Image (tube, rainbow, N blue to C red):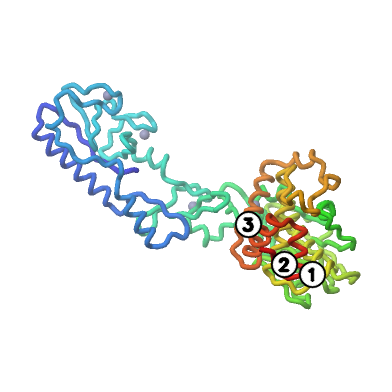
Amino acid sequence: MKFSCTSSYQDDQSKDANEDLDHANALSLVEDAKKPNAPGYRGQGIDDDELAKAIQESLSMPSYQPYQPVQFLPRGYRICGGCHHEIGYGHYLSCMGTFWHPQCFRCYACGQLIRETEFSLSGTYPYHKSCYKELHHPKCDVCHEFIPTNRAGLIEYRAHPFWGQKYCPSHEHDHTPRCCSCERMESRNTRYIYLGEGRSLCLECLESAIMDAGDCQPLYHSIRDYYEGMNMRIDQQIPMLLVERQALNEAMEGEKYGHHHMPETRGLCLSEEQTVSSIHKRPRIGGNKILDMRTHPQKLIRRCEVTAILVLYGLPRLLTGSILAHELMHGWLRLKGYRDLSPEVEEGICQVLSHMWLESEIMPGSTSVPSSSSYAPSSSSAMPSSKKAAKSDTEKKLGEFFMHQIAHDTSTAYGEGFRAANAAVNKYGLRRTLDHIHFTGAFPV
Ligand SMILES: [Zn+2]
Ligand SMILES: [Zn+2]
Ligand SMILES: [Zn+2]
Ligand SMILES: [Zn+2]
Ligand SMILES: [Zn+2]
């Protein structure tokens, strides 16, 4: 707890005056603590009741010690809060029941003497006000300034629930780019890449971004192998296209049956014959934006229930893969004759496959499917362990974030659906859960 305290030099020879001074100091402390700018912290979404409580707590000062008149202390029994030796008959300083030799009244952070009349005290440790602020006042991860206090005098900031990135609330409205993949805000000392269509990508996500069909095909094949490894082989050759946002939205409108989708659609499993503009050649990146995007119209021919799987370009490999795993599950359900599932059941089970694939990528050796299930991954289709081990910590952390996003989604279809589907799969295994869905259209409970 921090508060400012006024100090004044005192001399033990004139204790009547001391008593008044000490009393004055104690009063000024209480006054200071009641100032509206007493520190307090406020996270996102705290309501007014909690806000009021936060103010109360910031004023309650747990380190406060009641004023003790100087004359009750036996002469010579004051211990210096700095060197812990007895203070004799010379000058001393006192604040909140702690005493110091003048030469021991030093900032706990920088070790320099405190000469200012206002300082900060934490427990019994004094600090220069500026040193205390440097140590304890949160800084914004976007503009790198101290996070300002709001009108109620509290430090108010936004913090990302996964990354913990803290920033001034103002950056939500000042056009600070936010990464379309990992949701982190662009800090003032980095430059994100602008992908066009309102999407920005951070440099960590760019590192493994899938930018053309050549990058994406091997990934698509490895996910089909993953399905095969769980005895969910898809025999039909379903084309996979990497597309821009606009092409994805147009394709979505071209489908006869409405799709339930997230506010931001990143993948699609098509059933209609359509012409889709897809990306073939990796675009060049110049400055901090995408140059010469080359697309190519592709006519989809119906050979089976599923005409194509589309995925948004420019996302990191693990996110692209999790989208493909999700869309491929839609394809699998359609090809295996699962009909008219509720959005919660269909999206929920597709998210389970997406989550399982991510887990298999970032936690080599783990299987999220109980071994009793015949849909357990077989070792023959597992990727070579060396390839998995080569994943950087940055990429692993991203994968954990995508799993966190799936698990904590607040929407009914994707979030509630995933949690219900995941509970069923954990209890009954994937095969029995899917069989139950086939016969009843619902998750087993
Ligand atoms: Zn001392
Ligand atoms: Zn200092
Ligand atoms: Zn800021
Ligand atoms: Zn990112
Ligand atoms: Zn879906």
Which label is found at residue 407?
A: 3
Name the element at disc 3: helix
Q: Do the numbered discs 1 and 2 sit on residues whose CB atoms are within 8 Å? A: yes
Side of 1 where 92 appears, left or right: left
Under 8 Å from ligand 5: the CB of mark 2?
yes
Disc 1 versus disc 2: distance between alpha carbons? 9 Å
Name the element at disc 1: loop
Residue behind mark 1: 338
Name the residue nearer the viewer: 349 or 430: 430
- Image coordinates of residue 338 in percent, x first then y, are 79, 70
Q: Amino acid under label 3?
A: Ala
Q: How many residues crowd around disc 1 within 10 Å: few (fewer than 14), some, or many (20 or more)?
A: some
Taking the spot 19% from the left edge, 24% from the top edge, the residue there is 77
Q: Amino acid under label 2?
A: Glu
- The quarter of the picture where the N terminus appears is top left
Name the residue nearer the viewer: 380 or 125: 380
Residue 68 lies, with reference to residue 408, above or below; the image says above
Residue behind mark 2: 346
Disc 2 versus disc 3: distance between alpha carbons? 16 Å
- Image coordinates of residue 140 in percent, x first then y, are 49, 49
